[in-house]
Image: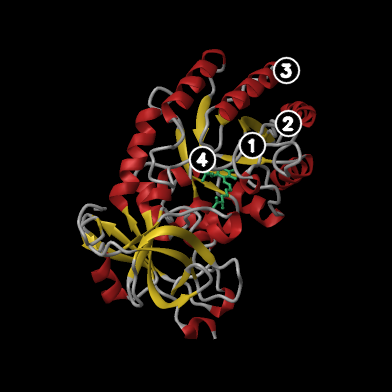
Amino acid sequence: MKNSSREFRIDGHKVKTLAQKYSTPIYCYSLKKIKTKLNNFKKNFKKINPLICFSVKSNSNKFLLKEIGKLGLGADVVSIGELVRALNSGIKPNQIVFSGVGKTVNEIDYAIRKKILLINAESKSEILEIEKIAKYQKKIVNIGIRLNPNIDAETLNQISTGKKENKFGVLEKTFINLVNYSKKSKNLNLRCLSVHIGSQILNVKPYQKMLNVLEKIIKKTNYHFEYIDLGGGMGIDYKNNNKELDLKKYSFLIKKFQIKNTSKIIFEPGRSIIGNSGFLISKIIYIKEGHKKDFIILDAAMNDFMRPALYKATHRIIPAQKKNNKTRKIYEFVGPICESTDKFLTTKNFQKLNEKDLIIICDVGAYGMSLSSNYNLRPKVMELLIKNSEVKIISKRQTLNDLI
Ligand code: LLP
């Protein structure tokens, strides 16, 4: 990624050349950037020596998962689809954890047969279901129980998961009852306490509170959990101002927690590994004068990238080619979809653009393609990966024939 040159490049490849060769819109990922992020993650948590299970929901591309598997990561999955995809990508079953509030009989049955590391159960009914299926299969199944610690993650409401009003996990009293129940079961092997309080968390304080709650509850259960699965949620820099979660501080807090609890730590990061590595390249179809601003109408839309429409998330937009022109414009970047929420960004200080120019929406590696849809019967876009300076197509552009 080079911002200094006038032509924006991703690992040496001019965005303009990629667009000419493959058309637009394109998701383009940098493997180099993924590796840098992962190495930094590992370095910060070195003293904890965690099992890192990549959260497949953040990006479920087959080839990316293969690369991530090769880098030694396990997987956090939330559906049979993600589980099959992780297994097909070469991720070992004993490095896969399965979360989610609504696992079906079919999903539980499959997960047990595949002997994955943990099924993290989220309710009493689910535990009874797992036990029933395990009994039928004559197996002892490794489970975790997800605790709802009733903690405000201080992030967007839509991506908060650890407050008592959220559907995730079970509250303290139920948690203790379920531990006692599982201890006595012949078909359940309770190995893990799991928790995940939310996503895009930028402050360590909520994590600190979470660890304090865990400490108290573990004491109350009087049970040794072989694993503590702390989930993901580590926030990244979307503004290019270096404000991201301080992983070192978080690591320090966990190390302190481990003095009393010798359990092995599992993490389920998604965004912090892959978020900053993805770029969405899009071409301007038209420019239209509006009230006090101009609309930049792109060939990418909310169906390709949902985060701004869904969460009012802000993603930087940059021109593929910097120009000398000093004129600054007020622009609203929008897509062609028939919804007013189909807009990416309003910005006051942008270089003058022309129709057919290329722009890049930044930091779309996580919850970008995985949240995309065929809304308005728009075909899904192509995904490219830059690996060792080579460009690889890692998923083809859907054609109209695929849809119609
Ligand atoms: N583990 C569990 C149980 C989760 O529910 C999630 C995310 C993760 C791990 C990974 O969290 P991460 O490290 O990526 O923050 N679509 C939203 C984010 C939804 C997150 C859902 N759960 C967005 O685009 O912001």
Q: Residues within 10 Å of mark 3 (few under 14, many from 20)?
A: few
The percent coordinates of residue 328 (x first, y second) are 35, 62
Left or right of 159: which side holds 4?
left
Q: Which amino acid, mark 2?
A: Ser
Residue bearing mark 4 = 268
Q: In which quarter of the image is residue 223?
A: top right
Task: Tell which of 2 and 11 is nearer to you.
Answer: 2
Judge: label 1 CB < 8 Å from ligand 1. no
Tell me which label, 2 or 4, sits earlier in the chain: 2
Ligand 1 closer than 8 Å to the CB at disc 2?
no
Three-letter amino acid code of the residue under disc 3: Lys
- Residue 386 coordinates in the image, percent (x, y): 28, 58
In which quadrant will I find the C terminus? Answer: bottom right
Question: Which of the pair 302/371 is nearer the observer?
Answer: 302
Q: How far apart are marks 2 and 3 (CA)?
A: 15 Å
Tell me the tag on residue 182: 2
Res 143 label = 1
Q: Residue shown at 40%/22% (left/top)?
A: 47
**Disc 1 residue crowd, few under 14, some 14–19, many 20+, Cα 10 Å:** many
| Dot 2 or dot 1, earlier in sequence | 1
The mark nearer the N terminus, 2 or 3, is: 2
Q: Nearer the viewer, residue 94 or 153?
A: 153
Kind of residue at badge 1: Ile
- Identity of the residue drawn at 69% across and 30% down: 149
CB of residue at label 4: within 8 Å of ligand 1? yes
Label 2, secondary structure: give it.
Answer: helix
Asked whether the beta carbons under mark 2 and mark 1 sit within 8 Å of each other, the answer is: yes
Q: In this view, does 80 lie to the left or right of 331?
A: right
User: Mark 3 — residue?
Assistant: 220
Q: Distance between the residues labelled 2 and 4?
A: 24 Å
